[in-house]
Amino acid sequence: MASSATPASVGHRPVATTNAKKIEVSGELTTGSTLQIADVFIEDEDGDPLSLDKMNNADDIKWYLVDNEAADPSGTPAATGTAFTIPADAGGKKIKIVYRIKTATGTPDSAFLPATVLLTSASSGVGGDSAADGTISNKLRSVTINVVNESGKPTDELNGTNDANTPVVGGTLEAVLECAATAAAECEVSNYNFTWQMADAGTPDKFTDLNNNNAEKHKYIIKGTEQNKLFRVHVTPKTTKATPENKRAIRR
């Protein structure tokens, strides 16, 4: 005589590692960078292996942009799955990933609750200028204007000032870009669009676009009709479909 069968046997749920490094992420915490989850570190008493494919297919990986470390990820995630491209307007924010571990084998094959990790160099191996605390760096850090006047100008006798940084008619304004250290190779002027703008010194908040006929668009030559004016340059990346990462520099 045989007994009735037992309920189907079960193993143990996978859990997140207790080590500081929770996941392995390639890429940089820099606007425009694509982050890719390569591994999730787990503990499974039965030795069942992780399945990123299961996690990816079930939307069990959610990426959230947050303002600070204390912020709780909520609402619609910025992305799901194993990859995420950081938007151009995300500079200064941080990323939290909410993920439910799934294993390729085993019953049950998923963690009881999702885990949350703040992406930093320690927690994920991610790179970036400010990856130590998880802050996203702007690819384009700043734009300044270099004034290149004709030799010997300005002088008080000729121009009413000796300040070498004052633009003089006939001189050239040149946009100078500074990018994050991890994006230095992308800081070529050919990667950006430049819109030069001008305002009257008496109304410094009313800038209008200039028609720049110069072959080198990151440079602008001051015309004789442009005296007592303020100049600035508006810079946007050429090849992003996200909200442009805008920077302006201003020069009197």
Image (tube, rainbow, N blue to C red):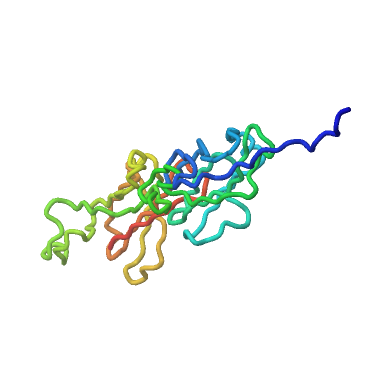
Residue at the limit of the structure toward the top, as seen here = 1
Front-most of 58 and 155?
58
Q: Is residue 83 left or right of residue 220?
A: right
Residue at the limit of the structure toward the bottom, as seen here = 202
Front-most of 48 and 251?
48
Q: Residue at x 67, y 40 (%)?
A: 58
Q: Residue at x 25, y 53 (%)?
A: 146
Looking at the figure, which quarter contains the C terminus? bottom left
Front-most of 232 and 220?
232
Residue at the limit of the structure toward the front, as seen here = 1
Q: Is residue 197 above or below residue 100?
A: below
Q: How many marks?
A: 0
Q: Residue at x 49, y 47 (%)?
A: 18
**Residue 143 in sight:** yes
Q: Is residue 182 above or below residue 95?
A: above
Q: Is residue 42 left or right of residue 103?
A: left
Looking at the figure, which quarter contains the N terminus? top right
Query: Percent from the top left, x then y, of residue 144?
Result: 30, 54
